[in-house]
Amino acid sequence: MVSERGIEADPDKIRAIFDMPIPRIEREIRGFLGRLQYISRFIARLTHICVPIFQLLRKSQPTVWDDQCQRAFERIREYLLSPPVLVSPTPGRPLLLYLSISDIALGYMLAQLDDSRNVQIIYYLSKRVLDYETRYVMIECFCLALVWATRRLRHYMIEAIDDDFLDEDVAIVTSLLGWHMYFDGATNHSGYGISVLLISLHGDHIPSFVRLAFSDWPPATNNIVEYEACILGLETTLELRIRQMKVFGDFNLVLRQIQGGWKTRDVKL
C-alpha cells in the first residue's frame, strides 16, 4: 500500500494475522504461512524466524505446536506491531544487497542510501536452506545466496538495453572505480562450461574459461553451473588478494528468452 511515507504493509492483512488463533493442525499452519507470504517483503529474516513452524510440515515430523513454534508465532506478531516502511528505488542510485547466511536459512535486504546517507529499505527476502544445500561449504553458500537473490530481485537490478548502442555499457565499465567480476555458465549437448571476467581498477581484463567434467547422469542444472562459475571467480579474486569488488551475473539472456525476445535453436538449451 503506497502512502506519503512510502510503501506500507496492508493493515487488513496484518489484522488478519492478529485475528488468527494459534494454529494447531496442518491446514491452519499452512493458512498462517500463506498469509505471511502476502507481507513477506516487509519482514526481515522471516524464514529464520519461522523455521520451527516450517518443520511441522515435514512428513516425518509430528504436527505438535511446541514452545519454539509459539515463540516464532509471537515474534511475528510483535514485529508486525510496527512494520517497516519501504521505499521505491531511486533510478541511478546504487543498490545495496545485504546477505545473512546460516545453515538453516538465507536472508536478504535490498536497500539504497538517501541524500543523508541513511539506509532506505526496498525489499526483504528470505529462503529456507534445503537438505542438500546444508552440505555446501561457506563459499558455495555465498554463491547460492548471491545467485538466488539476483534472480529473485532481477527486476530491480536489470535495466532496459538500448539496441542502438549495444556496446555502450561495456565501454563504461572500464571507467568505473573498483574491481568488477562478471560470471556466467552454460550447459548444452557439448557439455558444461563456465566463464569469468575480472576487470581491474585500471581497466585490465582478466578472463577465465573452464570446461567442467560433470557426469552425463544425473545432468547438472544451470543453477549448479552458475554456482561453479561464481566460485571460480571468487577463488581467483582470493588469489589476487582483491578486497573489494562488484559482482555481476549474466541473467539478461534468461530474461530475454522468457520474454520471447530471443529464441534457442537447440532443444537441449
Image (tube, helix red, strand yellow):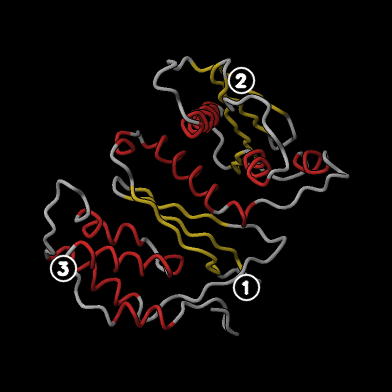
Secondary structure beneath disc 2? strand
User: Can you tell which quarter of the image residue 191 is in?
Assistant: top right
Residue 220 in the image: state x and y as whole percent. Answer: 45, 25
Residue that mark 1 sits on: 116
Label 2 CA crowd tier, 10 Å (few <14, some 14–19, many 20+): some
Work out whether mark 2 precedes mark 3 in sequence or the reverse, and give the earlier one. 3
Q: Nearer the viewer, mark 1 or mark 2?
A: 2
Residue drawn 19% across the image and 68% down it: 71
* Front residue (pair 46, 37): 37
Q: How far across and down, in percent of the image, does residue 199 sit?
A: 68, 33
Proximity of marks 3 and 1: CB atoms separated by less than 8 Å = no
Q: Earlier in the sequence, mark 1 or mark 2?
A: 1
Q: Nearer the viewer, mark 3 or mark 1?
A: 3
In the displayed image of the protein, which residue is found farthest to the bottom? 4
Across and down, in percent, residue 26 comes to 20, 61
Q: Which residue is mark 2?
A: 209
Q: Residue furthest front?
A: 267
1 and 2 marks in contact (CB < 8 Å): no
Report the mark closest to the observer, 2 or 3: 3
* Residue 207: quarter of image: top right
Q: Amino acid at mark 3?
A: Arg
Q: At x 60% / y 85%, what residue is drawn?
A: 4
In 3D space, how far apart are the residues under numbered discs 1 and 2 (Cα atoms)?
43 Å
Q: Position of residue 23 (x, y in %)?
A: 20, 70
Query: How dense is the environment of label 3, judged by Cα within 10 Å: few (below 14), some, or many (20 and up)?
Result: few
| Residue linked to disc 3 | 24
Which amino acid, by three-letter code, is at mark 1?
Ser
Question: Element at badge 3?
Answer: loop
Around disc 1, counting alpha carbons within 10 Å, would you say few (fewer than 14), some (14 to 19), or many (20 or more)?
A: few
| Quadrant position of the C terminus in the picture | top right
Separation (CA) of disc 2 from disc 3: 53 Å
